[in-house]
Image (cartoon, rainbow, N blue to C red):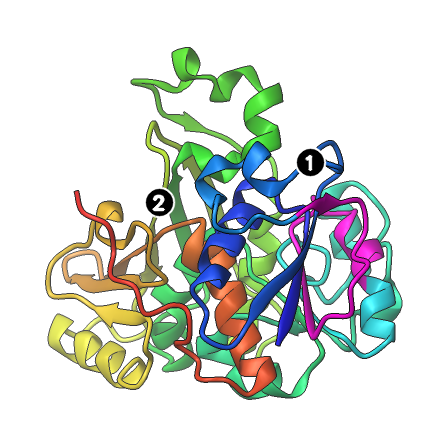
Amino acid sequence: MKAAIINVTGYAGSELARILHGHPDVEVASVTGRSAAGKRLPEVLPHLWRLDLPITRTVDDSVDVVFSALPSGASAAALAPFVDEGVKAVDIAADFRLRDPAEFARSYGTAHPAPHLLEKAVYGLSEIHRQPIRQTDLVANPGCFPVAALLAMAPAVHGGLVRDDVVVDAKSGISGAGRGGLNTDVKDHFAEANENVVAYGLGGHGHRPEIAQELAGLRDADTARVTFVPHRVPMTRGIMATCYAPLRDEGVDEETVRDAYRDFYAHEPFVRVTDDPPQTKQTAGSNTCLVHPTVDERAGRLVVVGCIDNLVKGAAGQAVQNMNLMLGLREQDGLDRLPLYP
């Protein structure tokens, strides 16, 4: 099967090319880039030297699946012609994550470019929406922070262990800003980011309504009460989301919670419930999410730590996992990689 990557030159697009190069059933047939069009892929990204493809402005080849790693707001317009033609598509941007186009406009400051496709799109967190993903032609790949937060909280919310009041305190590596962001935003330059931690998006981050939408769905409600504060920390890859929620029954102990989490994720190939608090480095380069639930008995509060690689499980790896489901392939194909260490 043949795949195309729109905007291969960003971090998510290049990571997608790297992962797909090792896929047993899918060949990268076409890659596009705006400023790099006309060059060969290894000229722009030397680490992808085995994928000696021309970078074009548009996808000119016939493909079975197309990925878009364009910025949010531009991605939907690029994918719409493929979806209308029945080509399977995975959007790594935010354009199809929010079901309400008005919420998209509030979060991203622009009108939705393809609202007619919103009903077709399925939110692409495989662990929650596996069957709908198998049946759709359009998947909205989740945001990186929501992947960590939702996988951390899903068993507790779905199982009714916590009240509707979730706080997500999340830390991300610098690559979360994207390759374009690193070129333009001074706070992401080494001299500004090194030995520094920055909280941002306190006035409203686009991932907050995404987290709220999916947490509400897990409890069959219309809304969810979520506080989300992201931080940028001086590392290249990784997200750690520490999530807090009041227990519905203050008598629930840690063993009960841990058993509920292990049951929920018993058959998930990419989620591990850990006995010890996880570290971001333990997920680097892999599609693994590490989840560690614990109980603060004095406060009557659940505390869960979720760790992922923001470029893999938080972007390109999740996209490949979704593609595998859409194409009827083995879900782990191309993704059976242990984390890098140290």
Q: Which mark is residue 238?
A: 2
Label 1 CA crowd tier, 10 Å (few <14, some 14–19, many 20+) = some
Residue 195 magenta-highlighted: no
Which image quarter is the C terminus in? top left
Q: Position of residue 11 (x, y in %)?
A: 53, 42
Above or below for 71 versus 137? above
Kind of residue sitting beneath label 1: Lys
User: Which quarter of the figure has residue 255?
Assistant: bottom left
Residue 66 magenta-highlighted: yes
Q: Position of residue 102 (x, y in %)?
A: 81, 56
Q: Which residue is mark 1?
A: 39
Q: Secondary structure at mark 2?
A: loop
Instruction: Determine contact: label 1, label 2, CB under 8 Å.
Output: no
At horizontal 34% and vertical 19% (from top left) the residue drawn is 196
For the record, the magenta segment spans 54-79
At horizontal 18% and vertical 81% (from top left) the residue drawn is 259
